Amino acid sequence: MSTRTAEEITSAFHRAVQAAVWAPSVHNTQPWSFTLDGPELALRADSGRKLRLGDTMGREMLISCGAALMNVRLALRVLGCQPQVRVLPDPDRPALLATVRMGEAVAADEHTRLLHAEIERRRTHRAGFTELPVADPLLEAFVSQASAEGARLTPVRSEAAVRVIAGLTGAAQDVQSQDRMFTLEMIRWAQPPGSSRREGVPAQGYPRQPGRTSPYFAQRDYAHGHPWGSDTDQSGSTSTGTVAVLTTPGDSRQDWLVAGQALQRVLLHASAYDVSAAFHTQALEMFHLREFLRQELLSGEYPQMIMRLGFSVDEGEGIRRPVTEVKQERRTA
C-alpha cells in the first residue's frame, strides 16, 4: 500500500465530503456532520436536523446519511483508493454512524466513474413524468444496483398494487396535513422564493401547478397556500412513471444505512440515463400503514423508500450547505 502524506489524506477527505453533501435527504435536511481525525473520517448523524414528528425513530435520517456515505465511497474510489468503512463502530456512541479510512490504491472502473459524475447532477423530482416509459433492461439494472448494496428494489408491476400504494400515500398525506405540529415541522424546511438558506426544499424545487397523475400520488405541500413553485409547463407530465419500493430484510439502524447506500447507488445510475425519481415517504412515516405494506405487498420485507421513476422535463434546483458547515478537523497538539 502506498504511503500518503497528511496533506494528501486531508485533501482526499475534503473532496469526499464535498461529494457527500450532495446526497438526497428527507426534506433536504442534510442531517449529517463529518469529522476528520488524522487518517480517519467520521460520519455522524446531526440529531438537531431530525424530524421529531415525521421521523421519530430516525430511520429517514439514517437513510439520508447512508446516501452521503455512498458518495464518500465513490469519491475515494475515483481518487484512487479503496475506502475502508466501519459502520456503527461504537455502540456507546449512537450518533457515530461510520468511520472511513483510505485503503489500498485501486483504479476506479468505468461504472464507478459514471456514478461519481452524477453526484452533483442528480435531482429529486416532485411531479409527474412524461409518457416515455423506463425500459425493462434499465429497471433490471436498477434492481442490480440495489442488490449490490444488500437491499432489494422491486418495480411494482401490478396495477392493483400501484393503486394500493397510491391510496396509502394519499391517506397518510391527508392525515398528516390535519396535524398542525406535523405541518409546522415540514414548513420549517420549506424555503420561500429568494431565500438564502442552503437547506430545505427551495421554492423552485417543485412545480406551482403539477400535473395530476393517475393513479394520483400525493405530493408534499411545501408551498402551504403560497403561490410558490416553478412555472415550468407540466401539461405533458401526467404519467405516474414506474413505481418501485426499496426494502431490506431487517429494520435495524444498520439496515437503514444499507438502504441509504443502495438508494443513492440506484439514483446515480438512473441519473446517468436521465431517469429521475420522486419520493413518497408519507405512508412509511405511519407505523400501521408501513406494516400493512410490509405484510400485504412486500412478503415481509421492510419498506424503506417508495419512489416513482421516469423521465421529466425539468431538473429543478439543488441547494446544499457548504462543506465548512458540515466538516470539522480534530487537531492534536
Image (cartoon, helix red, strand yellow):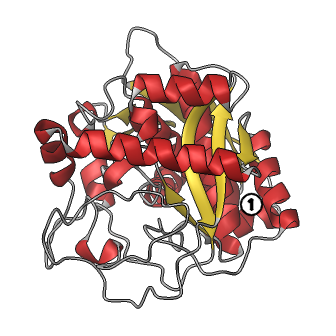
Residue 70 in sight from this viewpoint: no
Residue 241's spot in the image, x, y percent?
63, 67
Residue 198's spot in the image, x, y percent?
24, 64
Q: Quadrant of the C terminus?
A: top left
Q: Quadrant of the N terminus?
A: top right
Q: Is residue 19 left or right of residue 269?
A: left
Q: At x 45% / y 70%, what residue is drawn?
A: 127
Q: Nearer the viewer, residue 154 or 92?
A: 154
Kind of residue at badge 1: Thr
Q: At x 47% / y 13%, what residue is drawn?
A: 90
Query: Hey, which residue is sitting farthest top in the picture?
Result: 92
- Write down the quadrant of residue 276 in the picture: bottom right
Residue 130's spot in the image, x, y percent?
60, 81
What count of labels does the image hold?
1
Q: Residues within 10 Å of mark 1 (few under 14, many from 20)?
A: some
Q: Nearer the viewer, residue 50 or 249?
A: 249
Q: Is residue 124 above or below residue 228?
A: above
